Image (spheres, rainbow, N blue to C red):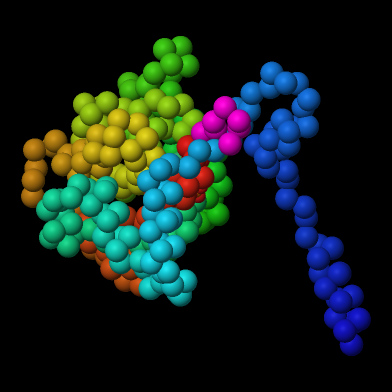
Amino acid sequence: MVHALYQAQMNLFELVKAAPPDPILGLSEAFRADPNPEKINLTVGVYQDADGKPPVLPSVLEAQKRLAAEGAGKSYLPISGDPLFLQNTRSLVFGPQSHLVEDGRVASVQTPGGTAALRLAGDFIQHGLGQRTVWLSNPTWANHKGIFNASGLEVASYPYYDPETHDLNLEGMITVLEDIPDNDVVLFHACCHNPTGVDPSIDNWDTIAKICKERRLLPILDFAYQGFSRGILDDAAAVICLHNHPSGNPEPSREDIRITRQLVEAGETMGIPVHDHLIIAGTEHTSLAERGVIG
Ligand SMILES: Cc1ncc(COP(=O)(O)O)c(C=O)c1O
């Protein structure tokens, strides 16, 4: 009997096609195998010290010490995550005295890392808001396309980097953003754009926010590196600008209300209470620092 089951499983698994090798990890293997002492690894973006080890931030070491001393339990978290982590993440992202947070207009969910946060955002859009295209910067982090495709969403791209000037192609970006169909989703890197390192200025964010507002686009901010560029607050410029859009209309329009309602309904079907803003927070702030990972 056991043998027959085993046979049946073997036949089943024969149908499985091998996934193609990961291009980045394949390069890392090639790097390890290369005996050249002058070699430099430009594949995975990780801070390394002179001995090739990722440094651990003193704040992370201190947090680990305190947690160990407290003997914190390892039980399950509530479905939407650790309430204290979520509360502190909201203050970090929107600022400690944000009226949005105080008015209860921000909803948050914790996920295991940034990749899962993006996937949850993708599933949330697909299940709750229906088929929409997600617009990604060109170039963008290599996994963005795969994550949104895995949620069943189409992706497209908008210009971002100008290889001639090594700077932001703001004009190209604006031209395409202004043409994106109503209610499509646009993903921005809030700071430390991966892979170019080029970020919009505060003025640029104002312009981008205004277009999102006028074109009724739904922005997603991938905020993997808060504090790694100009500082905790300055790095949040995109969040602030996209909320305080300069279109001069402080009152929400009917369309805003419609989109917000759609978000709320979508959230409710997925068990997520949603208000104006949904933070899907990876445990990136800890794990990123812990691993010394920047890309
Ligand atoms: C822009 C961006 N978003 C998301 C992630 C994924 O984060 P995590 O490693 O926590 O899944 C990365 C990691 O490289 C990234 O660079």
Query: Of 23 and 232, which appears nearest the observer?
Result: 232
- Evaluate whether residue 264 shows in this view: yes
Q: Residue at x 27, y 47 (%)?
A: 93
Query: Of 257 and 190, which appears nearest the observer?
Result: 190
Q: Residue at x 43, y 42 (%)?
A: 57
What percent of the width, then of the height, locates residue 193? Answer: 41, 32
Q: Please, what is the dominant secondary structure of the magenta stretch?
A: loop
- Segment tinted magenta in the rendering: 46-53
* Residue 192 shown left or right of residue 291 in the figure: left
What percent of the width, then of the height, locates residue 81? Answer: 37, 66
What percent of the width, then of the height, locates residue 179? Answer: 33, 34
Q: Residue at x 67, y 40 (%)?
A: 25
In this rendering, is residue 286 above or below 8? above
Q: Residue at x 41, y 64 (%)?
A: 69
* Residue 239 shown left or right of residue 147 in the figure: left
In this rendering, is residue 14 above or below 292? below
Q: Residue furthest front?
A: 69
